[in-house]
Image (cartoon, rainbow, N blue to C red):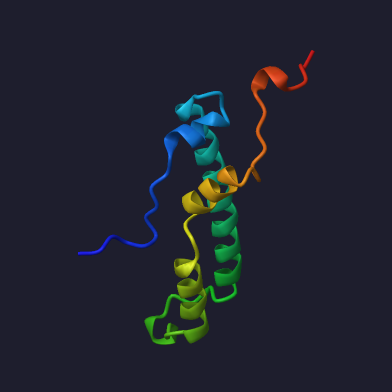
Amino acid sequence: MPANPSIVTRDTDKLAAKTNGNIYEAVAIMASRAKQLSVKQKEELNQKLSEFASTVDNLEEIFENREQIEISKHYERQPKPASLAIEEYIEERVNWRYRSELPSED
């Protein structure tokens, strides 16, 4: 059985190089970015699907909506937020700062 083409082997040394050799810090940065992307994607999907929300609980008035199904399928086919976050991190399109670098709140 061939491997899924979306599965990519990553060199952890290269990922960790951007955080002075700390792979855990690199993973935390990518995870934070993935969460941001996921929240944004979910908000967009909910906004588009809210147009189809029915206030009627009557089963007879609920019907199959092709446009709603197509919107859902479109979001299912999109790359996963974790994959996008990894690519952004590798391409150095993710910015992060350490708490010690943030302005102090006196």
- Of the 4 image quadrants, the one containing the N terminus is bottom left
For this view, does 31 lie left or right of residue 93?
left
Residue 102 place in picture, x, y as percent: 73, 22
Q: Does residue 59 sit above or below 14 in this rendering?
A: below
Is any atom of residue 14 visible in this view?
yes
On the image, which quarter does residue 43 sit in?
bottom right
x, y percent for residue 67 = 52, 83
Foreground pick, 28 / 15:
15
In the image, residue 14 above or below residue 9: above
Q: Residue at x 76, y 16 (%)?
A: 104
Residue 27, visible in the rendered structure? no
Q: Picture coordinates of residue 48 (x, y %)?
A: 59, 70
Q: Residue furthest top?
A: 106
Considering only vertical position in the picture, is 29 above or below 100? below
- As rendered, which of 58 and 33 lies closer to the eye? 33
At x 45% / y 74%, what residue is drawn?
A: 73
Asked if residue 95 lies left or right of residue 34, the reply is: right
Which residue is depicted at the point 44% across and 85% down?
A: 61
59 or 105: nearer the eye?
Answer: 105
Q: Position of residue 53 (x, y in %)?
A: 53, 73
Q: So how many labels did they put on this image?
A: 0
Q: Quadrant of the C terminus?
A: top right
Question: Looking at this rendering, what residue extends furthest in the left direction?
Answer: 1
